[in-house]
Image (cartoon, grey):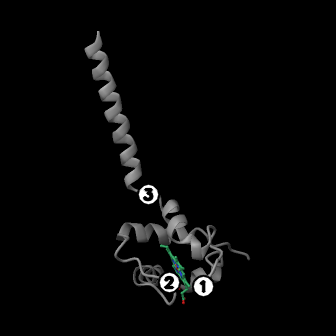
Amino acid sequence: MEKPFKLVLIVVLACLMGCTSATATKESVEDLYIKRCSGCHGVDGEPMKLNAPDFTDAEFQKSRSDEQFRVSILEGKDKMPGYKTEFDNEQVAALIAYIRTMAKEKK
Ligand code: HEC
C-alpha cells in the first residue's frame, strides 16, 4: 500500500520540477525588457532618462533599421551600455521585435 503511493509522489514531484525549470530557464522577452531596459526606456517605450529615444514615436522607429538597433543593443550607444556579453542573437532579435510593437502611428 505504501510503496506505490511513494512512487506516484516521486513521479508527480519530478514532473512538477521539470515543468517549472523548463519555463524558468527562458525568460520572456517582456520580463527581460522590463528588468533590463525599462529603467531608461520606460515600460511602454516612453523614455525615462538619459535622453533615450522615444520608442512610441513611429517616425523614430522608421528612421532606424533592425540592423542599427541590433548593433546599438550589442555594442551600446552613447550612454547606453552594450549587451553583447549577456544576450544571445535570439534574445536581441526578440527585444527588437518587442520594441517594434511599441510604435504608435499617431502621436
Ligand atoms: C542606462 C540607460 C539605458 C539602458 C539600461 C538601456 N538603454 Fe537603450 N538607450 C539609452 C540611450 C541614452 C539611448 C540613446 C543613445 C543615442 O542615440 O545617443 C538608447 C538607445 C537605444 C536604442 C536605439 C539605438 C539606435 O540605433 O538609435 C535601442 C534599440 C535601445 N536603446 C534598446 C535598448 C534595449 C533593448 C535595452 C535593454 C536590453 C536598453 N536599450 C537599455 C539608454 C539605455
Q: Position of residue 105 (x, y in %)?
A: 68, 74
Asked if marks 1 and 3 touch (Cβ < 8 Å), the reply is: no
At numbered mark 2, what does the secondary structure look like: helix, strand or loop? loop
Mark drawn on residue 50: 1
Q: Which residue is mark 3?
A: 27
Mark drawn on residue 30: none
Q: Position of residue 44 (x, y in %)?
A: 64, 68
Q: Earlier in the sequence, mark 1 or mark 2?
A: 1
Asked if marks 1 and 2 touch (Cβ < 8 Å), the reply is: yes
> Residue placed at 45% from the left, 79% from the top?
73
- Quadrant where the N terminus is found in the figure: top left
Q: Residues within 10 Å of mark 2 (few under 14, many from 20)?
A: some
Disc 1 to disc 2, C-alpha distance: 9 Å
Say if disc 1 is inside 8 Å of ligand 1: yes
- Residue that lies at the very extreme toward the bottom in this rendered image: 78
Callout 2 amino acid: Met
Q: Which residue is mark 2?
A: 80
Callout 3 amino acid: Glu
At numbered mark 1, what does the secondary structure look like: helix, strand or loop? loop
Q: Residues within 10 Å of mark 3 (few under 14, many from 20)?
A: few
Q: Quadrant of residue 87?
A: bottom left
- Residue that lies at the very extreme toward the top in this rendered image: 1
> With 56 as the anchor, is 90 left or right in this view?
left
| Whether residue 26 is situated above or below residue 75 in the rendered picture | above
> Residue placed at 31% from the left, 34% from the top?
14
Disc 3 to disc 2, C-alpha distance: 22 Å
